[in-house]
Amino acid sequence: MVFEKVQSLLTQSKVTFRLHHHDPVVTVAQAKAIVPHLAVNLIKTIVFKIKDGPWILAGVNAPDRIHYKYLADIFGVNRKLIRAVSAPEVEAGLGFEIGGVGPFPVASDVAVILDQSLMDLPHVFCGSGRNTVTVEIAPGDLAAAGQAKVAVIRKP
């Protein structure tokens, strides 16, 4: 169902994108081994939850790590109120398959943020909701389609 929401969101946004079908991948390491051509400019989407607040889907380049303080400052909350969400919680709460999480607002209580450095890339690859399909898209189009905030969120 999430995959269909993502496809609908992209189609309705009238952005150019391409779907790549492949064997299941769950980790970045698996993506590099199974579909190496899709692992260049790969966005890793990490899911957070603000206590008594929205889910956050934070996208960074796969090798990068997220700076929690930057994330908390952007959302105007204390760092202690943001927690990373486990893969089973993401699957149960948002419907993304493990390995298929992408920076798309699939529910009304989901905020999306992309690291500023992604905007310098000609195209990116990200999860589609399924771990067997990867989205290829220009980062500006991804930000527009996902109604994403763009800011520095990666560790220096």
Image (spheres, grey):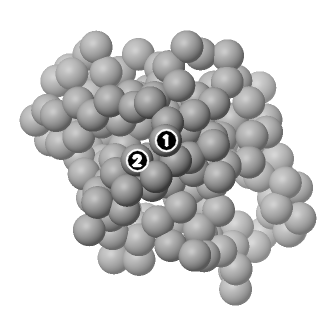
Q: Residues within 10 Å of mark 2 (few under 14, many from 20)?
A: few
Examine the rendering and report whether any part of residue 89 can be seen.
no
Q: Is residue 111 above or below residue 122?
A: below
Q: Position of residue 115 (x, y in %)?
A: 69, 35
Q: Residue furthest bottom?
A: 52
The secondary structure type at the circle numbered 2 is helix
Give me the C-alpha separation between circle 2 and circle 1. 5 Å
Quadrant location of the N terminus in the rendered image:
bottom left
Residue 11 numbered mark, or none: 2
| Residue at image point 36% right, 62% down | 5
- Total marks drawn? 2
| Res 141 → quadrant | top right
Q: Position of residue 147 (x, y in %)?
A: 65, 52
Q: Is residue 68 left or right of residue 54?
A: right
Amino acid tagged 2: Thr
Q: Is residue 147 left or right of residue 96?
A: right
Residue for badge 1: 14
Q: Is residue 108 visible?
A: yes
Front-most of residues 12 and 40: 12
The residue located at (65%, 62%) in the rendering is 111
Q: Residue furthest left?
A: 23
Residue type indicated by callout 1: Lys
Give the vertical position of 12 relative to 87 (above or below). Answer: above
The reply, left or right, for residue 101 in relation to residue 30 is right
Q: Are marks 2 and 1 in contact (CB under 8 Å)?
A: yes
Give residue 43's position: percent from left, percent from top.
48, 33
